[in-house]
Amino acid sequence: MYHLVVFASGNGSTLQAIIDSINSHQLEAKIDLVISDNPNAYALTRAENNNIDTYIIQNKKFEARDLELSNVLSKYEINLIVLAGYLKMIGPKLLDNYTIINTHPSLLPKFRR
């Protein structure tokens, strides 16, 4: 079984699709945590409505955000990160230690944040 953390910055429609797939037994996984850089993201409400832990990352500096995320994730037994409309760059601490799927790719460096 996959233990997921989903990163989202907005509405959370991809998060909801994952939740629905899990609930309908099409996907053998559990979402342990939803992380957002936007405290007003509806994705956080979707997570809370499904009893999924949430975390709001507010660190603006790349290196500090990377370290904070690494520390948060170390508290969970995550084996897959899903970037579901998360609009920040992911740092080496996560890239080197987790399998990551990005559902919302952009052309870097032109569209990075």
Image (cartoon, rainbow, N blue to C red):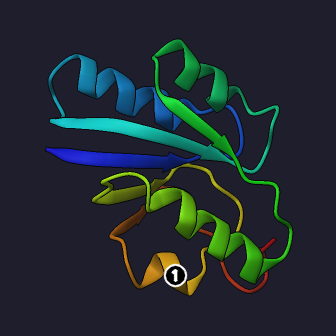
Residue at left 38%, top 51%?
A: 76
Instruction: Determine whether the residue tagged by mark 1 lies in a helix, strand or loop.
Output: helix
Which residue: 59% across, 33% down?
A: 12
Image location (x, y in percent) of residue 73: 47, 59
Residue drawn 33% across and 55% down? 78
Left or right of residue 68: residue 53: left
- Residue in the foreground of this view, choosing between 78 and 109: 78
45 vs 62: above or below: above
Relative to 84, is 62 on the left or the right?
right
Q: Quadrant of the C terminus?
A: bottom right
* Residue 44 pos. (x, y %): 65, 29
Q: What is the quadrant of residue 100 in the picture?
A: bottom left
Q: Can the viewer see residue 62 in this picture? A: yes
Pointer 1 local density, CA inside 10 Å: few below 14, some 14–19, many at least 20: some
Choose between 64 and 27: the one closer to the eye.
Answer: 64
Q: Position of residue 24 (x, y in %)?
A: 20, 17
Residue 32 in picture, x, y percent from top left: 39, 39
- The answer to whether residue 76 is left or right of residue 69 is left
Q: Which residue is mark 1?
A: 93
Which residue is drawn at the image coordinates 66% and 66% (left, top)? Answer: 68
**As rendered, which of 71 and 82 lies closer to the eye?**
71
Choose top left, top right, bottom left or bottom right for residue 28: top left
| On-image quarter of the N terminus | top left
The kind of residue tagged 1 is Lys
